[in-house]
Amino acid sequence: MGIVLADILSLVSTERLKEYVRRIEGLRHGWDNYDELEKRARYIEDTLASFQCSVTRQEFLFHGREYRNIIGSIGDPNAHDRILIGAHYDAAWGSPGADDNASGVAVLLEMAGILCRFPLRKTVECVAFTLEEPQPQTIHFLIGSETFAREARRRGMDYRAVFVLESVGYTDDAEGSQIVPLLVRAPVPRRGTFLGVIANARSKPIMDAFHRFSREHVPELEVVTYKVPFSGRLVPETRFSDHASFWNAGYPALMLTDTAMFRNPHYHTCHDTFQTLDFAFIANVTKALLSVILRLAHENV
């Protein structure tokens, strides 16, 4: 397995990841930049379709405007066990959102492009969520993923594992660059060069699998895991992405993150740009997630 999987991981392209970030980056707040958000949605759909994925939309209305989650399905459509990779493609108001979350969408697209080349025994869904960020009409956020997870539960969809990519492109190797939330009781490095993997109790087994497989296949990527008590309700910041919608619906889900506001000084500002990102880190995150998905989704890899 090691040799074959290593060959697959070598397909990850830093240049493609850069191109995806360039195409997604830019003002695209769900309400204030609706037309720009639509351009990104069309780009994501076209890119997934170019991989020969089965591409569908989940459309919904928010204050009279139509929005959509975009689903690229790979593998056996009749498979009982499903795996989901998700990332939101909207951005915070006034921010070009390169780290948050063009970086996550870039990994999503690179994953889809590689996974589509191989037969899989389980269905993998690559889902680009909209309206993750706060909107002016409501105190709620995670609107797109909440719509998706609620409908999946209503339809009885069985997701073995959900991996949500949330800001996976910023690093800082200076001592003290990593902030640790007050109530987090876990050893966390003080240099911001690791990937955080956040789980609740239900998702701890897939967190452990992620840590084990990524360490085996991408040892150069430092991974720090943390199981939050009470599904993160004591540390609300651990619920600030689309994985929380799946926790609420009872699915095992992980957030993969560079920790966003706890490391990146450009978070939700106009300075969250392409030039601030670490693409070697993004490539390693892609390789790590790819190794995990292949181990979970294809027994013969």
Image (tube, grey):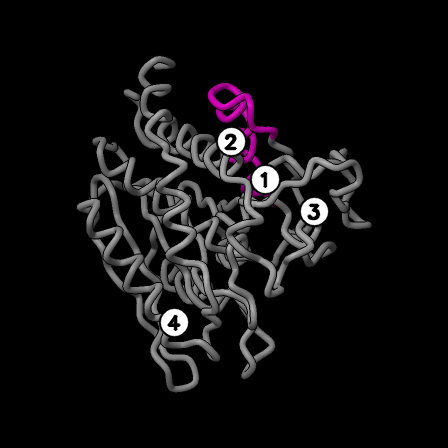
Expressed as whole percent of the image width and height from the top left, the position of residue 101 reads 50, 55
Mark 1 to mark 4: distance in Å? 31 Å
Viewer-side residue, 98 vs 195: 98
Closest to the camera, between mark 1 and mark 3, is: 1
Identity of the residue drawn at 64% across and 47% down: 259
Residue numbers of the magenta segment: 197-222
Query: Can residue 255 be seen by looking at this rendering?
Result: no
Instruction: Between residue 80 and residue 137, name the one nearer to us.
Output: 137
Q: Which mark is residue 229?
A: 3
Say which of 253 and 90 sits in front. Answer: 90
Residue located farthest toward the bottom when viewing the structure as drawn: 64
Q: Which element carries disc 4, helix, strand or loop?
A: helix
Q: Mark 1 or 2 closer to N-term?
A: 1
Q: Tell me whether circle 1 and circle 2 mark residues in contact (CB < 8 Å).
A: yes
- Residue beneath the point at 20% across and 52% down: 49
Q: What residue sits right under mark 1 in the picture? A: 197
Report which residue position mark 4 lands on: 36
What is the x, y in percent for residue 129?
Answer: 41, 60
Structural distance between the alpha carbons of marks 1 and 3:
14 Å
The secondary structure type at the circle numbered 2 is: helix
Q: In front here: 97 or 236? A: 97
Q: Give the secondary structure at mark 1.
A: strand
Q: Which residue is mark 2?
A: 210
Image position of 180 with respect to 285: above or below: below
Q: In the picture, residue 296 is in which quadrant? A: top left
User: Alpha-carbon neighbours of circle 3 within 10 Å: few (<14), some, or many (≥20)?
Assistant: few
Q: Earlier in the sequence, mark 1 or mark 3?
A: 1
- Do labels 1 and 3 touch, CB within 8 Å? no
How far apart, in angstroms, are the residues tagged by discs 1 and 2?
Answer: 8 Å
Quick check: 234 left or right of 42?
A: right
91 is higher (above) or lower (below) than 204 = below
